[in-house]
Image: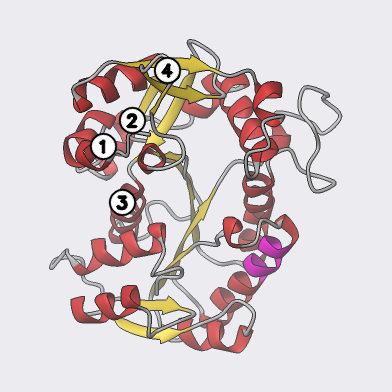
């Protein structure tokens, strides 16, 4: 059973399973709208598409019933509320326990407060009790799966390379030079991943039976500095791209949507880059998922889609 099956992570997971004739799994795709084009496309690929809504809990219980395992994900950005995301996760935990799943892969993130207490004044506290709400609400909820006795692999995701196809991509500066502008300090590493590798890695974890149950797997496809991302983007585009680091406080003041949250996230990436990237062992990940894409691999497939502003 795949939650968020018409979204980036769930859709990638559903397609990875459907594309693997040796997976041993069929796909039940959970979506709020089975009539959407994305849901219909999954049905054409062979998925069983069922309606499930976190705010109609019986539909989630019913959708997980009889499943061997599940890929579980919540979408903070649908509403921007850590409190709501926590409620959604509680629904998933209850449904997973009720269904007696033998293996859940839970798409989660670090709770930043473990390394950065709220009393630390280097970044503003958001939504009353979080540094990075979309990280912390997921990270603190990992314990719910353990307490409920759901056999779970905790898959810590990271920044999507796909961000460079939209708001995070290179933009032309006033002097005409393509510029990658990020709230990331010079020399700091940013772990990135092809969003489809979340699905491919989740499938590999599910196919490994019980090997990863109870474990945390930190996911990334590459660890690069801002300057390295810019250099590789430029080489793929065929035009130089320079990197411009924006101080965290400046980024918070720009008025961009969710700017404080994004700045806090990048500051966490930067201040704890050794811990964050250190928890994402690229060699181990390639043992789990040999098809894991580096940034160069991803660019080879996606450079033509980068919108140059």
Contact, CB < 8 Å: mark 3 with mark 2?
no
C-alpha distance separating marks 1 and 2: 6 Å
Residue 145 in magenta stretch:
no
The 10 Å Cα crowd at callout 2, few under 14, some 14 to 19, many 20 or more, is: many
- Residue 27 in view in this figure: yes
Residue at the disc numbered 4: 225
Instruction: Decide if residue 133 is on the left or right side of residue 70.
Output: right
Q: Is residue 26 above or below residue 203?
A: below
Using the image, tell me which numbered label, if any, was put on residue 286. Answer: 1
* Tag 1 and tag 2, C-beta contact below 8 Å: yes
Quarter containing the N terminus: bottom left
Counting from the top left corner in percent of width and height, residue 196 is at: 31, 51
- Determine whether, in the image, residue 134 is placed left or right of residue 235: right
Label 3 crowd bin: few (<14), some (14–19), many (20+), radius 10 Å: many
If you read the primary sequence from the N terminus, does the residue marked by circle 1 or circle 3 appear first?
Answer: 3
Residue 81, quarter of the rendered image: bottom right
Q: Provide the residue span drawn in magenta.
A: 84-90
Residue at the disc numbered 2: 282
Relative height, residue 154 to residue 122 (above, below): below
Q: Earlier in the sequence, mark 4 or mark 1?
A: 4
The residue sitting at 30% across, 76% down in the picture is 27
């Amino acid at each position: 059973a795949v939650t968020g099956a018409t979204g980036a992570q769930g859709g990638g997971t559903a397609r990875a399973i459907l594309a693997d004739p040796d997976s041993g799994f069929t796909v039940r795709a959970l979506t709020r709208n089975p009539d959407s084009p994305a849901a219909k496309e999954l049905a054409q690929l062979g998925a069983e598409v069922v309606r499930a809504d976190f705010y109609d809990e019986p539909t989630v219980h019913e959708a997980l019933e009889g499943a061997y395992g599940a890929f579980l994900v919540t979408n903070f950005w649908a509403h921007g509320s850590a409190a709501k995301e926590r409620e959604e996760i509680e629904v998933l935990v209850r449904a997973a326990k009720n269904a007696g799943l033998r293996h859940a892969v839970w798409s989660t993130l670090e709770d930043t407060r473990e390394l950065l207490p709220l009393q630390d004044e280097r970044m503003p506290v958001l939504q009353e009790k979080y540094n990075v709400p979309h990280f912390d609400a997921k990270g603190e909820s990992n314990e719910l799966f353990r307490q409920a006795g759901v056999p779970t692999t905790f898959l810590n995701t990271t920044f999507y390379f796909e961000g460079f196809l939209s708001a995070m991509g290179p933009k032309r500066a006033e002097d005409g030079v393509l510029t990658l502008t990020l709230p990331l300090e010079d020399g700091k590493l940013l772990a990135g991943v092809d969003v489809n590798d979340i699905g491919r890695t989740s499938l590999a974890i599910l196919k490994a039976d019980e090997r990863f149950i109870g474990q945390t797997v930190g996911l990334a496809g590459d660890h690069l500095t801002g300057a390295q991302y810019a250099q590789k983007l430029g080489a793929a585009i065929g035009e130089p791209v320079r990197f411009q680091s924006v101080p965290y406080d400046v980024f918070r003041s720009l008025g961009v949507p969710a700017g404080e949250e994004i700045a806090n996230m990048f500051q966490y990436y930067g201040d704890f880059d050794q811990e964050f990237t250190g928890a994402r062992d690229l060699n181990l990940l390639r043992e789990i998922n040999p098809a894991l894409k580096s940034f160069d691999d991803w660019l080879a497939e996606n450079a033509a889609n980068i919108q140059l502003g």
